[in-house]
Amino acid sequence: MSDDLSLRLGGSSKRLHSRKFGDASNEDFAPNNVDLEKEYKASQSNVTTEVYEASSFEEKASSEKPQYKSFWKKFYYEYVVVDKSILGVSILDSFMYNQDLKPVEKERRVWSWYNYCYFWLAECFNINTWQIAATGLQLGLNWWQCWITIWIGYGFVGAFVVLASRVGSAYHLSFPISSRASFGIFFSLWPVINRVVMAIVWYSVQAYIAATPVSLMLKSIFGKNLQDRIPNHFGSPNATTYEFMCFFIFWVASLPFLLVPPHKIRHLFTVKAVLVPFASFGFLIWAIKKAHGRIALGSLTDVQPHGSAFSWAFLRSLMGCMANFSTMVINAPDFSRFSKNPNSALWSQLVCIPLLFSITCLIGILVTAAGYEIYGVNYWSPLDVLEQFLQTAYNKGTRAGVFLISFVFAVAQLGTNISANSLSCGTDMSAIFPKFINIKRGSLFCAAMALCICPWNLMATSSKFTMALSAYAIFLSSIAGVVCSDYFVVRRGYIKLTHIYSHQKGSFYMYGNRFGINWRALAAYLCGVAPCLPGFIAEVGAPAITVSDGAMKLYYLSYWVGYGLSFSSYTALCYFFPVPGCPVNNVIKDKGWFQR
């Protein structure tokens, strides 16, 4: 696509943007809906479209650069304003288009299919994935039953990620921009802000999980009783001064990596993809050897579910996999936009996600089962098993093995935190405050806010951790359902790029109102969230708050319920109340695919 088009706002001469918007053709409208062009031109009198040279945006901004009359003005323009190319542009116009929001140009589309394989290979080997697998064991399932739920769960996850990635790989747009098509120019801020908050919480949680391998490295060097030698003045029942120190060490060590540009961070994933599998399989072999080749094959809890109880334990374990990926499904366009072609992010993700995550979870399950055989304890986190290795045999070999495995898992957590959280937060915040925040500043803001979260309370027990995952699924699955319906069913892959960067009256994605709100998306989102809220409130407020058994079961199925209801509701609303810029007249009966 080579739309060298820009919108002139309100009849003025201020040009918003001048970039080649990817690979779409110069046709402004879908081929089977040519009347849209006439309707669009007739509906506006103050918006014109023109072609002009690629440097005009920068020349306009540069010519309006103010002279510094005081220290504070110089400080503001030199250090507060992050994008100097938009100094002459209003905050509203910079919100519409800037360097971080533009479609990825060809020079930065460097991710091939194998880069996505490396990405997910690096992503799957992390402590959090092992804990998700162990959560099924906590519900009373045995190891092979847990593994079946993982295959099914991550199989669905792979499909959802591929669907969400399509708009990024086709139009090279990030999620904050692509969501404008479904939610509206300004209402798209809601899913963006929603995801910013969740990315910050997850960054904090993942960093606190990484405190465990940091602790094991320190104990391998300074003694297994290091925790007892450091006085506890933290004042929380769920954490100690020593544990917070380990969390803070990882937090500080992560900061330099937040400054790496997104298209270059793939090298970290390559390194992680090489190191972590060796450490994981080494840990598994070590655990089975210590268990003399035996693992606990049955349930690791006193309560073994049967009948309906077993079915719901099975479904909850399956939903845990999907809820764990609720943020990554939303994040998918942020990485797929760097793909060399649309197919680069298709089969590689569809195959690699269920395959690689199932292998990783199997390692976590077997390590937990071997640990139960050795110590008679059902450890939720396999790293607790690694710590028992250190506590029961503190010798040179054990210390070296524990240190190396812990170091690799700390690197794994670093990669996961960057890919799933800091980059997502940075991308979203650059869309909200583009004049003052770029991806680097947004990532650093994410890290700073992580210190204000109390992840040790979320991580106190596996049940609380599962509750947190379900909470994310309630809100994010409904967003994903609306976006998927809008792109694949309603618009059939058609997005008008010059309109998605415009807040003028004639823009398709202003939806005919000055607030830029697609009320259909809002209604569908609420339809997806509402049924699961009673169960969520009861889970959070237990035991003081109780609801019916049916409400709790809806909550356990929150991802499917939220995604399915929001998807179907949005499709139905668009059938009865068609959206502007739609290439088909009947979103259910008409056929065709209009991606450009």
Image (cartoon, grey):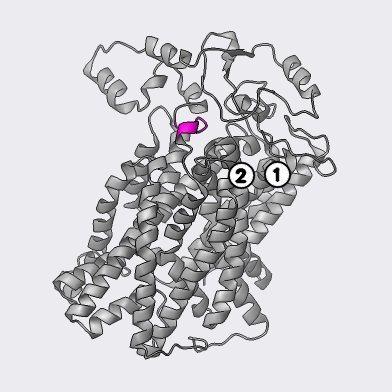
In three-dimensional space, the C-alpha distance between marks 2 and 1, rounded to whole angstroms, equals 9 Å
What residue is drawn where x is 23% and y is 64%? 234
Front residue (pair 172, 127): 172
Q: Would you call the spot at circle 1 few (<14 residues within 10 Å), some (14-19), or many (20 or more)?
A: some
Which stretch is magenta?
Answer: 100-107
Q: Amino acid at mark 2?
A: Arg
Q: Position of residue 257 (x, y in %)?
A: 31, 47
Up/down of 247 relative to 69, above or below: below
Up/down of 476 relative to 574, above or below: below
Q: Position of residue 354 (x, y in %)?
A: 56, 64
What residue is drawn where x is 49% and y is 70%? 359
Q: Position of residue 174 (x, y in %)?
A: 52, 39
Q: Is residue 506 left or right of residue 463?
A: right
Secondary structure, mark 1, is helix
Residue 66, located in which quarter of the rendered image? Answer: top left
Predominant SS of the magenta segment: loop
Return the mark for residue 438: none
Residue 77, located in which quarter of the rendered image? Answer: top left
Q: Which residue is mark 1?
A: 488
What residue is drawn where x is 31% and y is 77%? 386
Q: Which residue is mark 2?
A: 166
Q: Nearer the viewer, mark 2 or mark 1?
A: 2
Could one spot residue 277 in this view of the protein?
A: yes
What residue is drawn where x is 21% and y is 75%? 399
Q: Is residue 442 left or right of residue 550?
A: left
